[in-house]
Image (tube, rainbow, N blue to C red):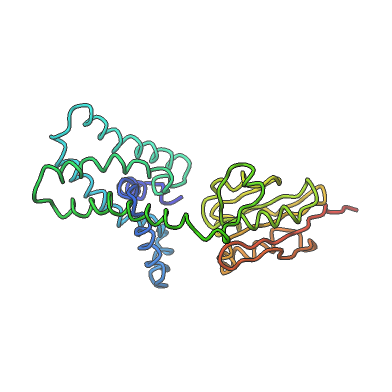
Amino acid sequence: MGSTQSGWLLWSLAAAPGYALPIKSIATGIRDLGKQFQSFRDWMYEKKINDHVFLAGSFSIILTLFLILEVKSAFDMFNLHFKIIIICFCTIPFIGLAILSNRFQWNYLMFHSHTFEYWLVFVFPTLIILSKYKHTYFRTFCLSGILLMFPIYKNLQFLAYQFPPKSDTIISKTESARGLGQSRFSEAIQCVEDDSKSALDVLFFLPTGDSGDLVLRTKLRTLSTHFSGDNFPNADKFKTSRTLNIYCAYDSSLLSNNAFTNALESKFPPTSLRKVIYSNPKTVTVTKIMLVPKLHG
């Protein structure tokens, strides 16, 4: 919440256009590098500084400055309509997200899903400068790599991963029937659906990141908590009025998160029966928990 108020909101606003570019992985890598130093983490905690906004934002602000200078250099070569388009895409979305961030105290400006599409508009000033000038600025060289070469590389990498050996392709029956592709949860979903015998059972998705379309991938009733490493420990305790099984399907990497594993124990009644029915150290683990109504009197 602190990153959505006063000076930190302005910091996020300045960083947002640069963070919209395709190299968020580098920005988050800088954040993760900074978090490796305990003294630095203690300093940020003492000053109540959000590590993502400060570290990823610092890198992104440099890219924002590059974008501003690039637009300024190419601005006179745009016609009136394109000048209006550039100004609108460079200001209105980010101002709107800043207002939402301040209103709801959640940093929409530095959340990747909300601004990623705008980088396509930012390509045009760089392309125009590359086509018009023989000698380009350092910023143009950097932005051409960020806006052109990096997405090409990432898409080629993505395409290469779309052709795994056929024998390794696993998809659940429900996903196949609904025309959905494979996900890292596919085998776990099939295992849960084979195990479940009651229409009351619930499949609880607990991914490390965004939940995406996970709730559409199963015929069971579902719950979902995105960014579970941080959010699930803050959830309320679970209760039931009917006996049922809840299948907690979570990224196996969360097993190294003490707050998450403690929550997996404490959020359900201590008398509930539980067992791991599926485990892949590289992808997903499923813990089956049987919930029964609390008896009174």
Q: Which image quarter: residue 190?
A: bottom right
Vertical relation: 286 (above or below) 104: below
Q: Find the residue positioned furthest to the top.
A: 81
The mark total stands at: 0
Name the residue: 38% across, 62% down. 29
Name the residue: 25% across, 54% down. 145
Expressed as whole percent of the image width and height from the top left, the position of residue 119 reads 31, 44
Q: Which image quarter: residue 166?
A: bottom right
Vertical relation: 105 (above or below) 232: above
Vertical relation: 178 (above or below) 55: above
Expressed as whole percent of the image width and height from the top left, the position of residue 283 reads 57, 63
Name the residue: 34% across, 51% down. 22
From the viewer's perspective, is 198 left or right of 45? right
Expressed as whole percent of the image width and height from the top left, the position of residue 267 reads 69, 58
Expressed as whole percent of the image width and height from the top left, the position of residue 23 reads 34, 54
Viewer-nearest residue: 209 or 187: 187
From the viewer's perspective, is 136 left or right of 201? left
Viewer-nearest residue: 157 or 267: 157
Q: Find the residue positioned furthest to the bottom.
A: 38
Viewer-nearest residue: 131 or 292: 131
Q: Find the residue positioned furthest to the left.
A: 134
From the viewer's perspective, is 186 left or right of 38? right
Q: Find the residue positioned furthest to the front.
A: 166
